[in-house]
Image (cartoon, helix red, strand yellow):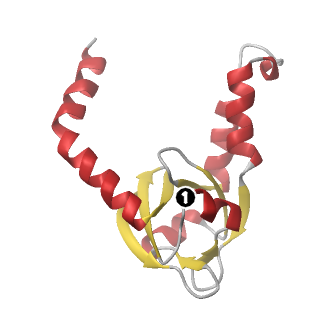
């Protein structure tokens, strides 16, 4: 399970080091893709296969006929990149993904169970502060859905 919050510096060659705790679980090749809420998602190759299957599954082999599905799949698959983790645990984030989240200087690297998220560190801190203030209310909402 991928858990924890880490702030890492982006080096002069635009590489960021993955936390040691994540390296074994992620492996040597990862998939990095646009995420939601102004972050990037990192998946293992195995987890990416599961995500891909869930995104492409439908009641019909003609799922491409559904506009929302086409649009979201283009967003996720079209901007995804396979990235190698170097021998000391660094990755090079493609420029088009770095620009998407305005990543420079420092990155927040967050373990979220089955994926890693990479955030602009300032954006992450703002987001985290907002969610922390709402945590009780969010828990209440989530528990009601489960009880129904």
Q: Nearer the viewer, residue 138 or 54?
A: 138
- Quadrant hosting residue 82: bottom right
Q: Residue at x 59, y 88 (%)?
A: 12
Above or below 128: residue 91: below
Say whether residue 57 is visible: no
Can you give x and y, in whole percent of width and height, for residue 124 in the image?
38, 58
Q: Quadrant of the C terminus?
A: top left
Q: Nearer the viewer, residue 124 or 4?
A: 124
Can you give x and y, in whole percent of width and height, for residue 27 in the image?
61, 67
- Quadrant hosting residue 121: bottom left
Above or below 107: residue 58: above
Can you give x and y, in whole percent of width and height, for residue 139 in the image?
22, 33
Q: Nearer the viewer, residue 122 or 66?
A: 122
Q: How many marks overall?
A: 1
Say whether residue 131 is visible: yes
Q: Residue at x 58, y 85 (%)?
A: 88
Q: Which residue, given by chain and number where applicable, does mark 1 sit on?
A: 101
Q: Residue at x 62, y 62 (%)?
A: 99
Above or below 47: residue 142: above
Q: Quadrant of the N terminus?
A: bottom left
Q: Residue furthest bottom?
A: 12
- Quadrant hosting residue 95: bottom right
Secondary element at image label 1: loop
Q: Residue at x 49, y 57 (%)?
A: 117
Can you give x and y, in whole percent of width and height, for residue 23 in the image?
53, 71
Give neighbour class at mark 1: few <14, some 14-19, many 20+ (Cα, 10 Å). some
Is residue 5 shown left or right of residue 93? Answer: left
């Amino acid at each position: 399970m991928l858990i924890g919050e880490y702030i890492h510096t982006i080096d002069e060659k635009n590489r960021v080091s993955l936390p040691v705790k994540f390296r074994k679980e992620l492996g040597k090749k990862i998939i990095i893709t646009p995420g939601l809420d102004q972050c990037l998602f990192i998946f293992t190759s195995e987890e990416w296969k599961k995500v891909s299957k869930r995104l492409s599954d439908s009641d019909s082999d003609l799922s491409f006929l559904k506009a929302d599905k086409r649009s979201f799949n283009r967003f996720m698959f079209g901007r995804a990149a396979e990235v190698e983790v170097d021998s000391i645990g660094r990755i090079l984030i493609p420029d088009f993904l770095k620009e998407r989240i305005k990543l420079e200087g420092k990155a927040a690297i967050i373990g979220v169970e089955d994926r890693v998220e990479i955030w602009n560190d300032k954006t992450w801190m703002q987001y985290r502060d907002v969610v922390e203030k709402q945590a009780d209310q969010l828990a209440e909402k989530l528990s009601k859905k489960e009880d129904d």
